[in-house]
Amino acid sequence: MRKVRPLTVHHLNELLLICSLVLLVAVAAVRVSTRSGLPTLLIYLGLGVAIGQDGIGVVFGDAALTQVLGYAALVVILAEGGLGTKWREIKPALPLAAVLSTVGVAVSVGVTATAAHYLVGLDWRQALIIGAVVSSTDAAAVFSVLRKVPLPRRLTGTLEAESGFNDAPVVILVVAFSAQRAIEPWYMLLGEIALELAIGAVVGLAIGWLGAYGLRHVALPASGLYPIAVMAIAVIAYAGGALAHGSGFLAVYLASLILGNAKLPHWPATRGFAEGLGWIAQIGMFVLLGLLVTPHDLGDDIWPAIGVGLALTAVARPLSVLVSTLPFQVPWREKALLSWAGLRGAVPIVLATIPVVSDVPDSRRVFNIVFVLVIVYTLVQGPTLPWVARRLRLGEGEAAADLGIESAPLERLRGHLLSLSIPKDSKMHGVEIGELRLPTGAAVTLVVRDGKSFVPQPSTVLRRGDELLVVATDPVRDAAEERLRAVGRGGKLAGWLGTRGE
C-alpha cells in the first residue's frame, strides 16, 4: 500500500507561490481580454490547459473534487450576481425570466437532446444529459458580459434573472438523468423540480430578509465586517436550501438579491468585496476545469460538439425564446437578442462532471463534447453580442454616471452618515448646495476638494471629483439618498424633469 506523505510547510509554500502566480497572470489576462475582446473564460481555461498534462505536465483527473469546488465557486458567483442585480431592473422581467428558466429550459433540453441522439448517435440517456447541461445560460458569463453592453434595462434584467434562476432546474435534471436508477416519469420529475424550487425560494427569501433586517439594525464595530457577514448569509442560504432538500442555487441567488437591494451600511465596500470573491471563484473554477481536460483526447469530439452546438444556438435557443415569449408582448428585435444572448460558460462544464462522478457510460465523451461546445460558441457569441445589439438597434446611449453612496450607521444619533464622490459624468457638477434641496433632517456637512476639506455654504458650487459627507436622520435617510441620486442623473432640475434616484 502506497504511503501518502503528509502536507508540510514546504508544500504549503510551493502551493501558495503557484496559486499567487496563477492569480496574477489571470488578473493581467483581464486587461488582455478587455483590449482584444477575447472572453476571459477562454483565457482562464487556456491557462489551466497550459498547466495541465499536455502543457507543463501537472496531472489532475479528480472529477469529484472538481465538481465540489465548482459548486462552491458557483455559489459565490451567484451570490455576487444577486448582490449586483438591481431589483427595479429585473422586477418587470421576472415573469418572462421565470418562463425562460423553466419552460424555455425544457424546450431547449428536448431539442438539443434530439440533435445529440440523431446527429451524434448518443444513447437517449447521454443525449438528455448533454441537452440539460448546455441548456442553462451561464451566470458568470452573463453577469460579466451583459453589464458591458448598453442594452435596455428590461433585456438586461431578463437575462440576468434567467441566468440566476435556470441553474436550479438544470442541476436537478442533470442529477436525475445521471442517477443509476431509471429515469423517473416526466410528471414525477416535474413535481420534484417544482418542490425543490419552492423550498429553495422560501429558504432564500426568508434568510435574505432576516439577514438584511439584522444588518440594518445592528451596528458592527468595523466596516470590514459587513462584507463578511453578507457573504456568510448568502452561503447560509445555499446550505440551508440544500439541506432542506430544496434548490440551494435558487436560495443563494434570491437571498443575495434581497441583500443587494436592502441599502445596507458600507455597501460599496461590500460590493467590492463580493466582486473580488466572484473573480477569484471564476478564475479558480476555469483554471481547474482546464486542468481536468485532456486536449489530445478532444479530437474525435470536435465535430460532434460543433453539430450539437449549432442545433442549440440556431434551433433550440431561438425556439425556447419563441415559446417562452408567447404570453408576453416582446418585439421581434428583443426576441432575436434573447436568442443570441444565451451565453454558456464554465457552469455547463462543471455540470458535465456529474455524470463522470456517477460513472454514466460514455460520460467522458459527454464531458469532452460539452467542453469543446462551450469553447467554440463562447468564441462566437461573446465577442459578437455588442455587434448584434447595435445591428438590432437595441443599444442605449451613455447615461449619466450613477453615484456610489456609502452609508455608515450613527447608532446613538439614530442617523446615517452618507459619503459620496461626484464622478466625471455626473450632472451634480455645477449644482449649488442649496439647489440639492435635501429633505429636512439631512444636510451636507463637509466637502473635500483637491485634498482639502471645508464646511460648505448654501451657495457653494459642487464640482466633479468633490467628496461629500451628508448627515441624515433615520426617517429621511432613504429620501436623502434618492434625492442625491436624482440630482446626479438629472441636475438641479431633476424633480421637475421627472428624474428619480431609485
Image (tube, grey):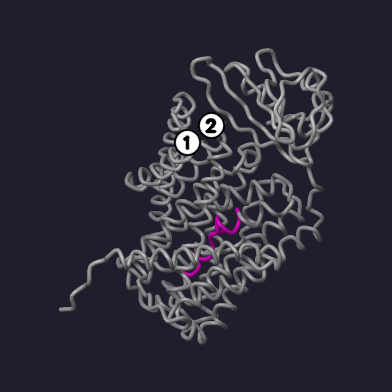
Contact, mark 2 vs mark 1 (Cβ under 8 Å) = yes
Q: Of discs 2 and 1, which sits in the foreground? A: 1
Where does label 2 land, which residue? 264
At which x and y percent is residue 394?
A: 78, 53
Amino acid carrying label 2: it is Leu
Question: Where does the N terminus fall, quadrant-wise?
Answer: bottom left
At x 82%, y 30%, the residue is 491
Horizontally, is 465 left or right of 71 in the view? right
Q: Where is mark 1, residue-wise?
A: 226
Q: Position of residue 286 (x, y in %)?
A: 50, 66
Viewed as shown, does residue 172 lie left or right of 164?
left
Q: Is the stretch drawn in magenta largely helix, strand or loop?
A: helix
User: As rendered, which of 432 and 174 lies closer to the eye?
Assistant: 432
81 is higher (above) or lower (below) than 426: below
Task: Judge by depth and name the residue closer to the eye, 252 or 22.
Answer: 22
Find the magenta span and give its range. 130-143
